[in-house]
Amino acid sequence: MGETTVTTLEGREQAAPHSVAEETAGKGPLHRLRTPRRPRFWFEILLIAVSYWTYSLIRNAVPEQKHEALRNADWIWRVEHHLGIAVEESVNHAVNSVTWLIVGMNYYYATLHFVVTLGVLVWLYRSHPGRYAATRLSLFATTVVALLGYYFFPLAPPRLMNGGDFVDTVLVHQTWGSMASGDLKHMSNQYAAMPSMHIGWSLWCGLTIFALASAPWARILGLLYPTATLIVIVATANHFWLDAVGGMLCLAFGFTVARLWYGALPYALPRWVPGTRGAPLLPAQA
């Protein structure tokens, strides 16, 4: 059979792109599931909403094992002293002495964690549909494995440690909207500090922007975002340095899952899939 062709504006003929259905015809169901395809808007909205609701439900359903969480915090603090990296208290006090800075960090901690992550997902959906599903899978796998940490290793944040001299910046400066302040603190598990998903999610955002953005300034911002987040989580006494390491390990697991499922790292997959607006006549690597 001859290959179907289309004529371009220049008069040259090129092979018409096959649809995903054509390319996966005769393949097994597992192969079809592992083939990047055009994301469906309504499905993605529903999936993200249900996934976040489930994550919050499970995270907050983990018993707040206060005594074990405080004991684990003491152990983490001793380990950091042994490693010579226990400087969180100094950072916390230094930043807290600048009111406008610490209040800004409190709001950063309470909002950007969600806003930037959703923004990157929307950008991927619109501009990198061929890489969207794999990159989203890495984020979801990162979050799922974090739930195991919350369950098996309850950990009090530095601001809730017994006998510590940390400043609870949210409480002192009465940050509105934070899950660690007022009545909202009863809606969130206060002893789910390990691993830090602020680091897991922000590093996911930063790596995605750095790998896929074309503008140099955007790539630089991609690198700065997780760096700033690390400073914020420590300065506000919400996490230890080692919580950040836990978040990085979870993200490494998430990328490994995506790599095994799709056969390549998300950023190495084709930018476009047939059927998406803006796709070239011949599917090509971006």
Image: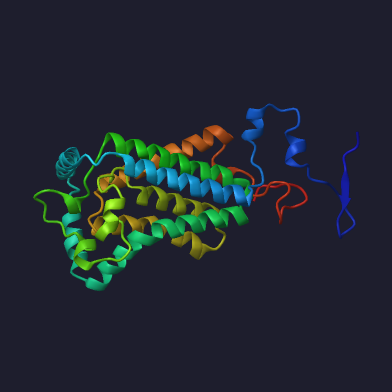
> In the rendered image, which quarter is residue 24 located in?
top right
Query: Residue 159, relative to residue 95: is it above or below?
Result: above
* Residue at left offset 38%, top offset 61%: 111
Which residue does the image show at 34% across and 60% down from the upper left? 110
Residue 151 place in picture, x, y as percent? 30, 36
Can residue 144 be seen by looking at this rendering? Answer: yes
Q: In this view, does 249 lie to the left or right of 241?
A: right
Q: Where is residue 122 in the image (x, y as percent from the top left)?
A: 55, 56
Query: Residue, x 33% and y 44% (percent of image)?
Result: 60
Residue 219 spot, x, y in % from top left: 49, 59
* Relative vertical location of residue 114 with respect to residue 60 in this rendering, above or below: below
In the image, what residue occupies the spot 21% across and 62% down? Answer: 171
Q: What coloring was used for the rendering? A: rainbow
Observer-nearest of 164 and 178: 178
Q: In the orientation shown, which residue stands out farthest toward the left?
A: 163
> Where's residue 75, x and y in %?
16, 39
Say left or right for 140 vs 285.
Answer: left
Asked if residue 87 shows in the view, the reply is no
